[in-house]
Image (cartoon, helix red, strand yellow):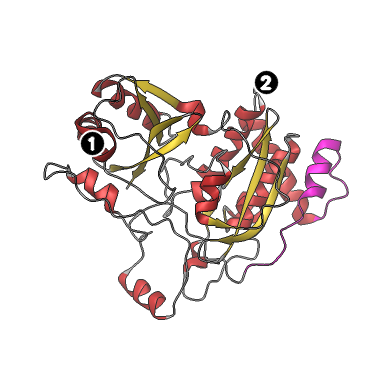
Amino acid sequence: MRRSKTIAILAAALMLGSCSETPEKAEKSSSEESTSETTAATANADDTPTSDEDTTGDEEDTLYDWTPISQAYLAGDPSGLDEIQTEIYKRASYVIDEVITDGMDDYAKELAIHDFIVQNVTYDINMLGIFEDHGEHAADPYGALVDGKCICSGYTTTFNMFMDMLEIPCTSTLAAADDNEAHAWNMVQINGHWYYMDVTWDDPIPDKDGRPEQHKYFNTSKEIMADRHLWDSTDDPVCDTDIDSYAAHELVTVSSTEDIVNAMESAFNKRSMNVYIIPEDTEGWSLEKADSSEKYLTASQIGGDTLKNAQKEFSKKHGSCICQWQRIQIGDKVAAAGYMFVF
C-alpha cells in the first residue's frame, strides 16, 4: 500500500502493525525478464494496491448485529427498526433491487453482492494512520452503505446481512490476521458446500473510481485462508471442495501465447482482474505444486517464454496494469493464477 514517506517513517517509528500481503521477492530466471514482470513479482507491501492490510487493533470485540434488518426485509416489515437500522434497510433493499435479477443462482447473487461492495465501498484509510481512528459507523453496514467507507468488520457484517436477506447461509468470524491485528471475514454456503470469503482483502487500496475489484478471497479454501488468517476453526463448517470457488469458475485452458493474452483481456474487460489458466501442454511450464498465498513468482518462472511473452503483449496495451503470478490448486490440477492491479 502506498503511503507518503513521512507517514511511513512515523508509522515505523511507532511500530504501527499491518496485515498487508507481502509477496516474496522472486529471483529473475534470466536477464531478459520484462520490467513489468519483475515489478509485479518483487512488489512489497507498500507498493501492492491490495487491501490485505487491516490494522484494526482497537476494534470492538463483537460484531454489529444486523439480524433485525435482515429479518425485517424477509418479513417485509421495517416498522420495528430504529433510525439507523431503517436507513441501512432502505439502502440494502435498493442494492438488491439493482444488482439481483430473476434467474440468478446463489453463486451469481453472491458474486453480485461481493462486487457491489468492493466497487462502492472504500476502506476507511484513517484506520491506517498513526492514531488508528475511523468513522463512527466504520464497523457496521451504515458505514459501508451510507457513508461509503468502513473497516473489515463493516465489510463482513454488510456481506453477511445481504446473504441473510437473500437466504444464503453465511457466518462471520472476528479473529486476527497473521500479524495478530484484529480482522473479520465470512463463510458462505453455495450449492451445499461451505467456502471462506474475505471481502475486505478483495478491495484494492488506495481506492479510486474505475479501479476493478479482486476475487482472490472469493469462495476460497481453508488452506489459503490459513496462510494469512489466525483463528480457531474448530466450529467452522467443513470446507471440502473448490467447485464453486471463483478460480474454478474462471479457469481457462490455453494452448498458445495468444490464448493467454485473450484470457487476460477477458478478465480485464469484465473487471474481474484475476485470470486462471492451465496449459494443454505443460512442457516449459513449472506447475508441480501450488504456492503459499503470499508467494509470488515471475511469469517466466511459472510458464517460461510462453507466459512471459503473453504478459509482454498484454502490457503493451495496458501499461498501467501489472500482474502478479502464483501457482494455485484447483481441484486435482495446479494452475497459474494472475492477479492484475491497475495504477
Give the amino acid type for the residue marked by disc 2 in the picture.
Asp
Q: Quadrant of residue 244?
A: top right
Task: Name the residue at the left extreme.
Answer: 31
Residue 341 in view (yes/no)? yes
Residue 76: in magenta span? yes
In the rendered structure, are the residues bearing label 1 and label 2 in contact, judged by CB atoms less than 8 Å apart? no
Residue position for label 1: 315
Q: Residue type at mark 1?
A: Ser
The magenta segment:
59-82
The residue lying toward the viewer, choosing from 118 and 286, is 286
* x then y, percent, for residue 159: 65, 45
Residue in the image at 23% along x and 43% along y: 37
> Residue at left 41%, top 55%?
206
In the image, residue 243 lies at what x, y percent? 57, 28
Q: Is any part of residue 138 visible from this angle?
A: no
Give the quarter of the figure containing the N terminus.
bottom left
Q: Please indicate whether residue 340 sits to the left or right of residue 173 in the image.
A: left
Q: In x, y percent, where is residue 101?
A: 65, 24
Relative to residue 341, is residue 48 depicted above or below? Answer: below
- Element at badge 2? loop
Whichever of callouts 1 and 2 sits on the residue coming sooner in the sequence is 2
* Mark 1 or mark 2, whichever is nearer to me: 1
Q: Residues within 10 Å of mark 2 (few under 14, many from 20)?
A: few
Could you tell me which secondary element the residue under label 1 belongs to?
helix
Res. 102 mark? 2
Direction from residue 191 to residue 41 in the image, left or right: left
Percent position (x, y) of residue 85? 77, 52
Q: Is residue 137 left or right of residue 269?
A: right
